[in-house]
Amino acid sequence: MARPEFIQIKLADIPEDVIEHYNLREIVDADGYVYCRVEKGMYGLPQAGIIAQELLEERLGKEGYFQSQTTPGLWTHDERKMIFTLVVDNFGIKYVNDDDAHHLVNAIKKHYVCTVDWEAERYCGVAFKWDYTSRIRKVHLTMPNAVQKALLRFNHVKPTKPQYQPYPHQPIVYGAKAQYETLPVKSPKLDKAGTKFIQEVTGVFLFLARAINGRLLPALSPLASEQASPTEETMRKCKLFLDCMATEEEMILTYHKSNMVLAVVSDASYLSETKSRSRVGGLSTWLDTKKTPSTMEQC
């Protein structure tokens, strides 16, 4: 650590064999506390993450690996044609030659215990299914049984009537000359158990939304904004979201190589959220390079 810190521990919370081994009764204070000087990383220490990161940078730096200055977690080598990402303790490696991959694995095994998945079937909880047999090579990303496990955790039963809308839409007022702010629904606040339920739902499904199913983000965003002080109306919206999750089939995200260009259209809604807030959104699509500009604009 850059500077040592101290921890106050109650002597009654320390096992007897540890007390005897370190003669802690000789240094306990009048209030029954023992003070420990922390100089290195340990479990539960907030600085443990940065200590491990700096140590990893030092060790891999000796092997020629360095982290991007603009994209944290993205690593390259000064000579070898390879690149990898690091999320907590998961390495995702892209390489051309097998020797380069073995060089990184051996560099890691010098200091850490690790396992290697040469088929690259799972990374950060996401399952990868590689398709090399079709004319256009593809990779399919899924999170198997993630929704089913979450619904079981929250004891949510599949609705009798299918629900395909994850969040209530803003009603359209036809013929109105002006659009006004939607006033929040007055509803009683939830207790601690209800508040924790809302927070758990948004936390559990947020990674699924970011990694696989991006269409869930507009629904989770307002739920997350209300989780600090949720109401019964928030719970109703949350149950609607769970009904949608129970109705939909497993989401599969597919990537494949193409000769297309990326076209992005962005826009913003007006007063579609509470407290006079709006929402910005966009649509990205891949367009064939042979299409004319007018056709691309229409898309």
Image (cartoon, helix red, strand yellow):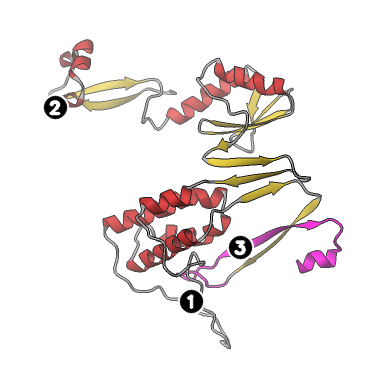
Q: Earlier in the sequence, mark 1 or mark 3?
A: 1
Q: Secondary structure at mark 2?
A: loop
Q: Could you give the CA–CA distance between mark 1 and mark 3, rounded to whole angstroms?
A: 19 Å
Q: In this rendering, is residue 293 above or below 182?
A: above
Q: Which of the pair 107/55 is nearer the observer?
A: 107
Name the residue that disc number 3 marks: 281
Quarter of the rendering containing residue 243: bottom left
Disc 3 marks a residue whose amino acid type is Gly
Number of numbered callouts drawn = 3
Task: Quote the CA–CA distance across marks 2 and 3.
Answer: 58 Å
Magenta segment: does it hold 271? Answer: yes
Kindly identify the residue that appears in the image at 29 percent across and 69 percent down. 188
Magenta residues, start to end: 270-299
Closer to the N terminus: mark 2 or mark 3?
Answer: 2
Report helix, strand or loop for mark 3.
Answer: strand
Q: Which mark is residue 31?
A: 2
Q: Quadrant of residue 195?
A: bottom left
Q: Are marks 2 and 3 in contact (CB under 8 Å)?
A: no
Residue drawn at point x = 23 percent, y = 12 percent: 22
Q: Which residue is mark 1?
A: 181
Task: Work out whether residue 280 or residue 90 is closer to the camera in this orientation and state it.
Answer: 90
Q: Residue at x 56, y 41 (%)?
A: 127
Three-letter residue code for mark 2 = Asp
- State the image coordinates of residue 109 (x, y, percent, origin top left): 55, 18
